[in-house]
Image (tube, grey):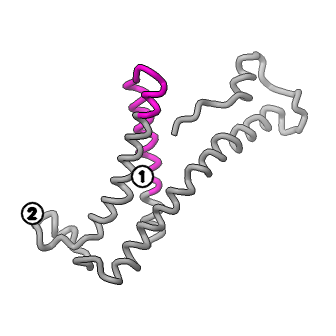
Amino acid sequence: MGLAIAIFIVVINLVLQRIIIALVDWIGEDTHSQQLETITNLVFLAQFFNTGLLMLLINANMTEHEPTFITSVLAQDYYDYVPMWYSDVGYQILQTMIINAIKPPIMVALTGWAIPALKRYLDRSMTMDEYKTKKTSMTAYKALYSGADYKV
């Protein structure tokens, strides 16, 4: 169950990241640097809230607080940081943070090297001949072999 929660949070973080990038692209900024800064700050805030604060709030026992219609939903086992909290909730938080820490290098490797290499291999009709291509224009050929812009 803990691994499922960690993977769910990572998937939500990926979705939030894509939505934030699309919104900042749509809104636009004056410079490319400002756009990357805005994307980085907003993705950090969304992932911080989703990974850290939301996980703590979901696992808190809020039955002693108002309003009662919300706190009845949040009636968990732990009133405070007891030893069992660390083995249950703390482990889920740590597991999610580890996955979030190794996800960026893996995504860079996939989107920056593996997927473009596969597209080039398919363009060459699955041969190793680097001079063979299905592209009919130099623009399409350059677009395939140069790669896309990297955002976050």
Seen from this angle, which residue lies furthest bottom? 83
Residue linked to disc 2: 67
Mark linked to residue 12: 1
Place of residue 67 in the rendered image (x, y in percent of width and height, measured from the top left): 9, 63
Residue type, mark 1 in image:
Ile
Q: Is residue 142 left or right of residue 35?
A: right
Q: Say which residue appears at 46% left-offset and 56% top-offset.
A: 10
Per the picture, the main secondary structure of the magenta-coloured stretch is helix
Q: Are marks 1 and 2 in contact (CB under 8 Å)?
A: no
The count of marks equals 2
Decide: is 109 above or below 101.
above
Residue at screen point 29% across, 77% down = 81
| Quadrant holding the N terminus | bottom left
- Name the residue: 66% across, 47% down: 109
For the residue marked with disc 2, what is the amino acid?
Pro
The residue at 83%/35% (across/down) is 125
72 left or right of 127? left
- Asked if 2 appears above or below 124 in the picture, the reply is below
Which span is picked out in magenta?
Answer: 10-37
The local secondary structure at tag 1 comes to helix
Is residue 151 located in the magenta-colored stretch of the structure? no
**Residue 104 % position (x, y):** 56, 49
Q: Please, what secondary structure does the residue beneath circle 2 have?
A: loop
Q: Quadrant of residue 136?
A: top right
